[in-house]
Image (spheres, rainbow, N blue to C red):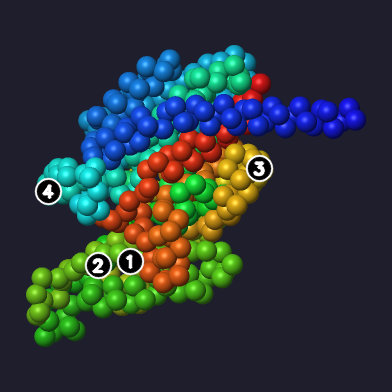
Amino acid sequence: MRISFLLACLFAVGAGAQESLDALIDGEIGSLVATYKMLHAAPELSLHEQKTSAFFAAQLRGMGYAVTERVGKFDRPGQVGYGVVAVMNNGGGPTVLARTDLDALPVEEKTGLPYASTVRTTNDAGQEVGVMHACGHDIHITTMLGVARVMAALKNQWRGTLVLIGQPAEETVGGARAMLQDGLYTRFPRPDYALALHDSPEYAAGQVACVPGYAMASADSVDIKIRGVGGHGSKPEAAKDPIVVAAEVVMALQTIVSRENSPLDPAVITVGSIHGGTRYNIIPDEVNLQLTVRAYRDEVRRKLLGGIERVTKGIALAAGIPADRAPIVRVSETETTPATYNDPALTERLRGVFVQALGRENVLTGSPLMGSEDFGLFSLDHRIPSTMFWLGASDPAKLKESRDTGKPLPYLHSALFAPVPEPTLRTGVKAMASAVLELMRK
Ligand SMILES: [Zn+2]
Ligand SMILES: [Zn+2]
């Protein structure tokens, strides 16, 4: 009798908390949708998030957060970091970090939406490009503002320190590292948990998807310069042809994945760019390759990178290229990010929270991807439990049609990517606020 009374009280508390969260979101959703459309029409490229970060910071300051702007130290001289850190102290308790990214992509929007971006700018290479929030980081920013407001309004329900961050340069995977290098965990409270969400057209608006364990791959950019000895195209015996060596290298690199790596460990080596030579009858001096390398486990990542250097140099040696012309293999120190590993215990804990907030039918298990994110860096090599979940962004009817016909919906980075604003934002705020409240509940 007493137990059932206690259970009834507990359920009443749970339901009451959900109701107050729903009521708060109802009150905010109109202005959140307006904010989203405003941000969508005003995207900024990675490393240029000046106005977006200023807007994000001003909004958070207005809600009572202690806000620091321009957090982010990049290696490039003179580069301003447009990171934002907003802290709300609410007594002793856990520190929870939630992150949104701020940047958009050099994509010319073709959605035809009334709030579509018409922004054009000059990129760092001097080319004129269209700019679009084609990855939906505007959904993330707006969701974070909704979460910030909810948490400020429900201050009597939680304790601890909430750290909300706006990260620049996610698309170029430099922003997370730049914020950490600028003292994110020393100038500001170091979190006990780190959370993020990412919108996805693969799930319906109203749904979220969790991926326990490895969710996204590490990414490394590798440059290979194959040097030969140039000469006349009619006289190969007097030259060392780097094009033939490059061709062999491209094919042999795939055997690192298929023959040296366990088939149970996901790995990708893609040669995305190859350039050499100027015309028909000249054997050039060099060929340049650009690669992307993906893996989950760090051991596999290191094995792939080591294999690329060994295979490339070995093929050049076999071709008789002199030692002083050996290939130069350079692994980028800036275009690198570890895998996104969702702490399984934390992910399962939040799954339970999402089920309560959204209903069991709206909480799915997602598949891991070989795409990459720099959110994983905030976990400091898995030392800080962290998780990123997918936020459905597609019209359920269109998603069903796409599944029935087999015709995929426009994916992230597409000029046609168009999240459905209202239900996506509502679900994002509810899921993320419920997650944060779970970790900080009084
Ligand atoms: Zn993206
Ligand atoms: Zn993204």
Q: Earlier in the sequence, mark 1 or mark 4?
A: 4
Which residue is pictured at 37% across the width and 27% down the height? 84
Mark 1: amino acid? Val
Compute the Cα span from label 1 to label 4: 26 Å
Is residue 372 visible to the viewer in this orientation of the structure?
no
Q: Residues within 10 Å of mark 3 (few under 14, many from 20)?
A: some
Compute the Cα span from label 3 to label 2: 48 Å
Q: Secondary structure at mark 4?
A: strand
Compute the Cα span from label 4 to label 2: 24 Å
Is residue 28 visible to the viewer in this orientation of the structure?
yes
Please name the residue that numbered disc 3 is placed on: 352
Mark 2: amino acid? Ile
Q: Earlier in the sequence, mark 3 or mark 2?
A: 2
Q: Secondary structure at mark 2?
A: strand
Indicate yes or no: mark 2 CB to ligand 1 under 8 Å: no
Which residue is pictured at 41% across the width and 72% down the height? 405
Circle nearer the viewer, 4 or 3: 3
Please name the residue that numbered disc 1 is placed on: 271
Where residue 296 sits: x, y (%)? 52, 56
Please name the residue that numbered disc 4 is placed on: 128
Which residue is pictured at 45% across the width and 70% down the height? 404
Indicate yes or no: mark 3 CB to ligand 2 under 8 Å: no
Where residue 419 sits: x, y (%)? 36, 49
Please name the residue that numbered disc 2 is placed on: 274
Outermost right residue: 1
Does the residue at mark 2 contact the one at mark 1 (Cβ under 8 Å)?
Answer: yes
